[in-house]
Image (tube, rainbow, N blue to C red):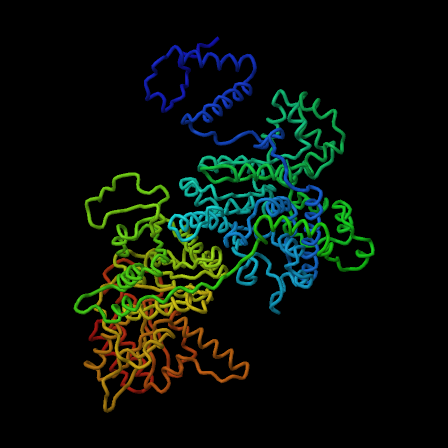
Amino acid sequence: MSDPSRPTENPVISELDQLPDRDREETAEWRASLDAVVRNAGPERAVYLMRRVHEFAASTGMSLPGLLHSDYINTVPAAAQPEFDGDLEMESRITALNRWNAAAMVTRGARLGLGGHISTYASAAWLYEIGFHHFFRGKDADGSGDQLFVQGHASPGIYARVFLEGRLSESQLDSFRREAGGHGLPSYPHPRRLPWLWEFPTVSMGLGPLSAVYQARFNRYLHARGIKDTSASRVWAFLGDGEMDEPESTAALTLASRENLDNLTFVINCNLQRLDGPVRSNSKIVQELEARFRGAGWNVVKTLWGEAWDPLLAQDTTGDLVRRLGEVPDAQMQTLAARDAAYIRKHFFTGDALSALSASLSDARVVELFENSRGGHEPLKVYAAYRAAVEHRGAPTVVLAQTVKGHTLGPAFESRNANHQMKKLTMEQFRAMRDLLELPIPDSALAGDQVPFWHPGQDSPEVRYLHERRAALGGPAPVRRVVAKPLPEPPAKPFEDLEKGSGHQEMATTMALVRLVKDLMRDPRSGARWVPIVPDEARTFGMESMFPTAGIYSPQGQTYDPVDADQLLHYLESTTGQLLIEGITEAGSVAEFAAAATSYATHGEPMIPFYIFYAMFGFQRTGDQFWALGDQMGRGFVVGGTAGRTTMTGEGLQHGDGHSHLLAATNPAAVSYDPAFAYEIAVIVRDGLRRMYGERPENVFYYLTVYNEPKHQPAMPPVPGIEEGIVRGIYRFRPAEAPAAGPRLQLLASGTAIHWVLRAQELLASDWGVHADVWSVTSWTELRRDAMRADDARTRGEERTPFVTRALSGAPGPVLAVSDWMRQVPDQISQWVEQDYYSLGTDGFGLSDTREDVRRYFRVDAESIVVTALDRLARAGQVPPETVARARAQYGLGR
């Protein structure tokens, strides 16, 4: 017999070895007791006792590290299931109708080659139906209700339910995935395509979970700042187990637990299959997810097995059944769901104890255990799990529900690796489905080639029950509502201050924009609506002055003495703080921005998010989220600070941003500007506030790029129509001094490039007798979009001239366009410029050096602009070719 008080050959090193043992004899007695249990009752009994002791200790408030996973059984045992407060038979009929219509909708569309997904909703139907009947709050009560992040591939089931409610017609169901006519249903939850129904776009996998976390957090932010009472709102995110492999899916789990977001519930449909095969073929995804969520501080509720398993688990006095359930890998579990009783008896009920346990079961019962009796398919089990989730306090909850993908669709679909790609059922399969679901659909309705939709009638008991349940929960869901609530016009003074220029001081456009926002935040009428969002670089953008004045939001407030408390611009966290400093997470920042940018619809409270980031890490890193933001119709200001490829000295290849405007141009909702001067920023922001928050708000968001290069900021020149030119994209900033004769040229520039072009204008005049007009292009993209709209109008017989064409009409000489971006950015407008058009830009990877040397490297400095301008004039016959060679030698550009 070993002495448990003596060290073994390979002792376990523990952090407890660093703590003094006040009673070694008592410790030895505990170890001896455990050793005796192992010898006499087996290790399983010892583990059980240790877990019960751990559970008891935790219940008494002792501080113990949590266990990472539990047995592969339901969290809520059968004896503890709460009383069901609905009509189970009625809800079963409703769910059967929704299953039928969802399958019919996708099948009818698939016969036209439109595709669709059947199996996901088939596995998750009860996960949604129990929520809709008993948990999901509508907006009728407080205007917010619950926020539902529906799994994208399950959308046919939601459409089927909305059809049953009477909010969709049969013709609309028949137009699933047929949107070109303007009346069809989008394939997935797309708010922009169906704005009265969908609130959140979720089909870009991984973004839904991330957005849900930040939506729950933003709900708390609104409540803490006294803008909206969101205490009753809960965020529900429905996810797939395969989707959880996306890094964004788990990126914010610790944020949710750290901030005690018990207003958040994840429901993960663990049907054990991703698109091509098992999620975890040789292990168990449920156990993996449980450990991950528990480790991140979440409450975990598992609903894995249906009612048929309850008596077997009650008979499992040896623990063999529980142990077997925990060791069978997922791929084998899927195989068991598709095999006969003989196979299951041979490959699952192994060993004497399990063989004896299964001996009393009929073959039909054995098959039923694996084919149908999963927790996610049984309403009482799902109800118990949801009740446990909503009643938990102090942490977010994840419900891990095990299902069979393709459930009720027949053996050709259920648990098949290929079922994600299977888009339609045959009429024979529909008949079998009808019989299984006990639907009152006559054979005559299934005699043709087209499967019918089935509705019991608006006065049927099913529809009346459905409406009664939704009325009790606050109205229909999902639903998106926009109540007009324009914000008051901001005060004029902050804009006028920028329009006056910086006097003798130099100021970067980044600082100009930050100063403007800080002044607007002081407005007593709308200042509280601003939501500054920064991914941990507020000091980079000169925003530290907001720390002590606006405060940094933290649900815990400030529980420490900040190291800079004695300084004027000290770090200040507050439960009512206005700034959201998200840490080093651009993805989290965009998710927060989306929640704030759509608050006008989600909560009926328009907010003005101002998200400023290191420009390179905006559209390049989080472009998928910005696309979803456009779908969600978010409004606000996105700001790329430290913009341009040559402005960030010393930062180099992965920081120099010369292409974000090109990426932003692909997003139809992004209104993009590259302002050169502070007064341009004032005009653009004021127009943006009008367009997004005025009497007739538009579903766009503004993207501005600003620079960290200090420059003299001139006052807004008294040029006729200058504000229109700034907003629409181009105006003449500095015309050439009126020449009697000589070569002429038009120089176009955006952002910081305006300063190189202005210097080039001077050199061209003084050294070469060439007179150039300088134009400030505030938006290459908006000029292009205006021109494209003009083209579209002409195809309809309406004569329209693009704004850029009119602005440059008759301007003498060739046009040379310059920016700190790739040449494709200014090249966007080339086809609508009547003059000879040429561009300069910063194509290629960035590099580290001084601004001057990097600009010379890319051939966009003033001297390079002069040489290029002379070359274009020489090609047009306006200057001799040797002039170009002389200029190249004079400026050292011969190499």
Towards the viewer: 535 or 473: 473
Residue 531 locus on image (x, y percent): 36, 56
Left or right, 531 with reference to 293: left
Towards the viewer: 254 or 249: 254
Residue 451 locus on image (x, y percent): 75, 57
What residue is at 46 percent from the left and 12 percent from the top? Answer: 32
Residue 646 seen: no
Count the numbered circles shown: 0
Reply above or below: 879 against 295: below
The quarter of the rendered structure image containing the C terminus is: bottom left
Left or right, 559 with reference to 484: left
Residue 265 seen: yes
Q: Where on the picture, by quarter, is residue 337? A: top right
Residue extending furthest toward the left: 504
Residue 722 locus on image (x, y percent): 32, 78
Q: Where on the picture, by quarter, is residue 887? A: bottom left
Towards the viewer: 104 or 55: 55
Left or right, 215 with reference to 893: right
Residue 766 locus on image (x, y percent): 19, 81
Residue extending furthest toward the bottom: 740
Left or right, 678 with reference to 662: left
Reply above or below: 786 against 313: below
